[in-house]
C-alpha cells in the first residue's frame, strides 16, 4: 500500500477514540483504524486521508454500541443534545415520543390485546419441545390466532446455525443475504423482516439463558427488528 498524508488533527481524533481501550490492546485498535482509513483512501484514488475518510473507517471498524463514544469525539454538542432528549423522553406521555414505538392497547384488566390481522413470529430457543417455554409460546400464539392474526413458530434447535466470523458484512450492508455466512439463518432473517410482531422465548438456567440463543442473534443485532 502506498504512503499517505493525513489531514491535520485526524490522527489525534483516532487517539481520543482509542483511549477507552486498555493499553495492552489500544495500539491494535489504533492500527486497525489507520489501516482501514488508508485502504479506503487507496480504493478511492486519494493520497490524503481526510477527516471524512477517518470517520468512514470508524463506522466500519467500531462495533455498533460505540456510537456515544464516537459522538463524544466527532460532535460533542450533538451527544449532549441526544442525552438531554433521552432524559426528557422519560417524562413524556405515551404517544408523544419523537420516535415510533409500537404499543398494544391494554384493556381494563391489564391484559395486552393482540392486534388483528398481523403476522406474529414466535422464536423458541428451548431445545425441549413441549416444555415450559414451548407451552407458553403456544398459548401466546393461540390468543393471536383467535384474534385473526397469522402466526408461525420457529425452533432454533432445528436450524443449522453457524458462528459469526466477524467479517462485519452485515454492518457494511454490502451483502444481499444480510449475512455472509450461509446457514439456516438466511430464511430466518427474511421472516424477521416480514413479521409485524416478534415473540422471542428462551428458558433461563442457573447459568443464564440457553446457549441456543446467542449464536443465532449475532448478525441479527444489525437488523431493524419489529417490536
Image (tube, helix red, strand yellow):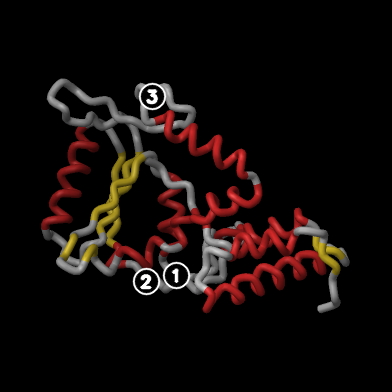
Residue tagged by mark 1? Answer: 183
- The residue located at (75%, 70%) in the rendering is 39
Q: Is residue 154 left or right of residue 39?
A: left
Where does the image place residue 54, in percent across and percent down from the top left?
Answer: 72, 60
Q: Secondary structure at mark 3?
A: loop
Instruction: Find residue 175 and report its image quarter.
Output: bottom right
**Where the N terminus falls, by quadrant?**
bottom right
Q: Is residue 77 left or right of residue 50?
A: left
Q: Is residue 180 above or below residue 171?
A: below
- The residue located at (19%, 49%) in the rendering is 137
- Mark 2 surroundings: few (<14), some (14-19) or many (≥20) residues within 10 A: few
- Mark 3 surroundings: few (<14), some (14-19) or many (≥20) residues within 10 A: few
Mark 3 and mark 2: Cα distance apart in space? 44 Å
Cβ atoms at labels 2 and 1 below 8 Å apart: yes
For residue 92, the mark is 3
First of labels 3, 2 by sequence position = 3
- The residue located at (30%, 57%) in the rendering is 154
Q: Secondary structure at mark 1?
A: loop
Where does the image place residue 185, in percent across and percent down from the top left?
Answer: 42, 63
Residue tagged by mark 2? Answer: 160
Nearer the camera: disc 3 or disc 2: 3
Q: Is residue 33 above or below residue 113?
A: below
Mark 2 and mark 1: Cα distance apart in space? 6 Å
First of labels 2, 1 by sequence position = 2
Amino acid at each position: 500500500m502506498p504512503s499517505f498524508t493525513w489531514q491535520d488533527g485526524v490522527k489525534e481524533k483516532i487517539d481520543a477514540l482509542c483511549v477507552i481501550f486498555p493499553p495492552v490492546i489500544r495500539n491494535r485498535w489504533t492500527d486497525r483504524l489507520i489501516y482501514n482509513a488508508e485502504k479506503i483512501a487507496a480504493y478511492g484514488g486519494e493520497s490524503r486521508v481526510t477527516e471524512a475518510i477517518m470517520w468512514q473507517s470508524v463506522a466500519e471498524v467500531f462495533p455498533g454500541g460505540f456510537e456515544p463514544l464516537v459522538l463524544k469525539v466527532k460532535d460533542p454538542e450533538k451527544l449532549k443534545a441526544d442525552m438531554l432528549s433521552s432524559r426528557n423522553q422519560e417524562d413524556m406521555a405515551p404517544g408523544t415520543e419523537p420516535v415510533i414505538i409500537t404499543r398494544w392497547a391494554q384493556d381494563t384488566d391489564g391484559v395486552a390485546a393482540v392486534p388483528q390481522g398481523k403476522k406474529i413470529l414466535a422464536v423458541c430457543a428451548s431445545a425441549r419441545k413441549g416444555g415450559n417455554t414451548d407451552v407458553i409460546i403456544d398459548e401466546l400464539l393461540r390468543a393471536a390466532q383467535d384474534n385473526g392474526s397469522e402466526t408461525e413458530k420457529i425452533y432454533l434447535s432445528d436450524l443449522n446455525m453457524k458462528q459469526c466470523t466477524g467479517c462485519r458484512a452485515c454492518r457494511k450492508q454490502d451483502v444481499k443475504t444480510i449475512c455472509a455466512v450461509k446457514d439456516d439463518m438466511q430464511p430466518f432473517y427474511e421472516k424477521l423482516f416480514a413479521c409485524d410482531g416478534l415473540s422471542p422465548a428462551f428458558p433461563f438456567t442457573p447459568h443464564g439463558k440457553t446457549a441456543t440463543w446467542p449464536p443465532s442473534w449475532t448478525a441479527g443485532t444489525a437488523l431493524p427488528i419489529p417490536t
